[in-house]
Image (cartoon, helix red, strand yellow):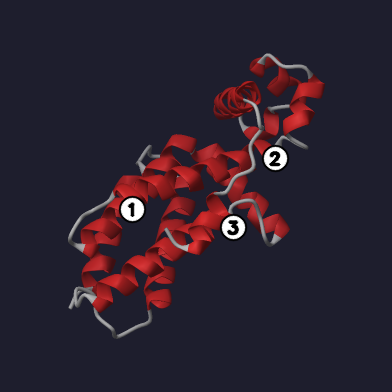
């Protein structure tokens, strides 16, 4: 794992196992509630009640309800880093698709409302809570593409940074359409075919 990856995944957690368990419980129960009611309809009191903790306990771990989403993003970064390290596929194109399928699966598991809330946070703040996730994913792709170019699988027509940005912009564009989609199409249905075409264009 690169230095960047190690830096991002070094998430500060409570020192005791009880504290870590309590924090994880708050995140898990809060996310379940947000999925059911929508982020804008959930109060801090709701989160405390569904998590089974007092207000003071909640504030011991989180400064606001938005911090719940931030913690979710950090956990996803950690999980993605671990998943990426398990990939030992010889084809870099296949490895890229597996990583992107993993990202899309995470989006779908969060659900439209949570993804929309995270995007809205990014628009309002300029640098939102989703930035570490985007940067982490982009750096994984850049490293993967560069290795693929060095091994002769991917074309050297463009820099790895350009290819990675192009791929991720497609993911974010399609996920924005998915948020507004009323037909019930999955994000995978909207995105994976386009991603396969983009990656095939990178091949030598």
- Gap between marks 1 and 3 measured at Cα: 18 Å
Q: Which residue is mark 3?
A: 131
Q: What separation in Å lies between label 2 and label 3 (alpha carbons)?
A: 14 Å
> In x, y percent, where is residue 71?
61, 40
- Tag 2, which secondary structure? helix
Whether residue 182 is visible, yes or no, is no
14 horizontally vs 99: left or right? right
Is residue 23 at all visible to an observer of this figure?
yes
Total marks in image: 3
- 11 versus 204 height, above or below: above
In the rendered structure, find residue 66 and report the number of the disc placed on it.
2
The image shows residue 15 at horizontal and vertical percentages of 66, 32
Which quadrant would residue 203 be assigned to in this image? bottom left
**The C terminus appears in which quarter of the rendering?**
bottom left
Q: Earlier in the sequence, mark 1 or mark 3?
A: 1
Q: Nearer the viewer, residue 46 or 98?
A: 98
Question: Label 3: few (<14), some or many (≥20) within 10 Å?
Answer: some
Task: Evaluate if marks 2 and 3 touch, with contact meaning CB atoms under 8 Å apart.
Answer: no
Percent x, y for residue 164?
Answer: 40, 69
Q: Vertical placement of 196 versus 52: above or below?
A: below
Which residue sits at x=55%, y=38%?
A: 113
Give residue 103's position: percent from left, percent from top.
40, 49
- Is the residue 114 above or below the residue 172 in the image? above
Residue 124 lies left or right of residue 180; in this view the side is: right
The residue where tag 1 is placed is 99
Q: Secondary structure at mark 1?
A: helix
Residue located 58% across and 56% down the image: 132
Q: Is residue 68 left or right of residue 2?
A: right
Residue for point 38% across, 64% down: 141
Q: Which mark is residue 20?
A: none
Q: Nearer the viewer, residue 55 or 82?
A: 82
């Amino acid at each position: 794992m690169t230095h960047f990856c190690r830096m991002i995944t070094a998430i500060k957690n409570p020192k005791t196992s009880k504290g870590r368990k309590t924090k994880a419980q708050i995140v898990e129960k809060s996310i379940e509630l947000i999925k059911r009611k929508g982020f804008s309809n959930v109060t801090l009191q709701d989160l405390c009640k569904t998590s089974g903790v007092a207000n003071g306990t909640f504030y011991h771990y989180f400064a606001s309800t938005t911090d719940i989403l931030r913690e979710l993003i950090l956990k996803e970064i950690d999980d993605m880093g671990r998943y990426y390290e398990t990939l030992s596929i010889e084809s870099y194109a296949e490895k890229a698709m597996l990583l992107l399928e993993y990202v899309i699966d995470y989006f779908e598991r969060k659900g439209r409302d949570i993804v929309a809330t995270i995007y809205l946070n990014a628009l309002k703040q300029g640098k939102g809570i989703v930035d570490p996730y985007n940067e982490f994913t982009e750096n994984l792709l850049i490293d993967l593409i560069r290795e693929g170019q060095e091994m002769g699988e991917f074309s050297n027509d463009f820099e790895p940074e350009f290819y990675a940005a192009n791929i991720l912009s497609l993911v974010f564009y399609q996920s924005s359409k998915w948020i507004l989609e009323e037909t019930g199409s999955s994000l995978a249905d909207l995105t994976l075919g386009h991603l396969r075409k983009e990656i095939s264009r990178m091949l030598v």
